[in-house]
C-alpha cells in the first residue's frame, strides 16, 4: 500500500518535468517578475515554471511534515 503514493509522486514529478521541458523549448521568450517595487531580471518562462514547481513541491513537503508530526504527537494529561 505504501508503494502507490511513491509511484504517484514520481508520475506527477515526471509529468511536470516533461511539461516544463516542452514549454521551455517552445516559449523561450524572457519574462520579468514584479513584486511591489522589486523587479527581476529577464528569465525564460520555462525557468520560471521550473522554480515555481520546485518551490511548491518543497513547500508542500514541509507542510505535510508539520501536519503529520502535529497529528502524531501524544496528548499530555494534566
Image (spheres, grey):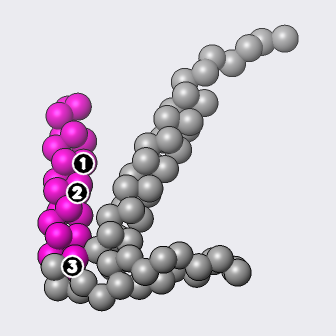
Q: Residue 20: give x, y in percent of width and height.
A: 23, 70
The front one of 13 and 2 is 13
Residue designated by label 1: 9
Residue placed at 55% from the left, 24% from the top? 72
The front one of 41 and 61 is 41
Q: Is residue 7 magenta?
A: yes
Query: Is residue 19 shown above or below 63?
Result: below
The earlier-in-sequence mark between 1 and 3 is 1
Mark 2 crowd level (few <14, some 14–19, many ≥20, 10 Å Cα): few
Residue designated by label 3: 23
Query: Is residue 63 shown above or below 46?
Result: above
Residue placed at 22% from the left, 76% from the top? 24
User: In the picture, residue 38 is in which quadrant?
Assistant: bottom right
Residue 71 is at least partly visible in this image: no
- Number of the front mark, 1 or 3: 3
Residue placed at 77% from the left, 12% from the top? 77
Q: Residue 69: give x, y in percent of width and height.
A: 55, 28
The label on residue 12 is 2
Amino acid at each position: 500500500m505504501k508503494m502507490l503514493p511513491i509511484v504517484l509522486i514520481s508520475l506527477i514529478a515526471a509529468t511536470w518535468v516533461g511539461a516544463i521541458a516542452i514549454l521551455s523549448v517552445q516559449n523561450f521568450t524572457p519574462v520579468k517578475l514584479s513584486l511591489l517595487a522589486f523587479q527581476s531580471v529577464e528569465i525564460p518562462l520555462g525557468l520560471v515554471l521550473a522554480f515555481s514547481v520546485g518551490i511548491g513541491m518543497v513547500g508542500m513537503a514541509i507542510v505535510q511534515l508539520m501536519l503529520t508530526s502535529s497529528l502524531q504527537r501524544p496528548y499530555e494529561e494534566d
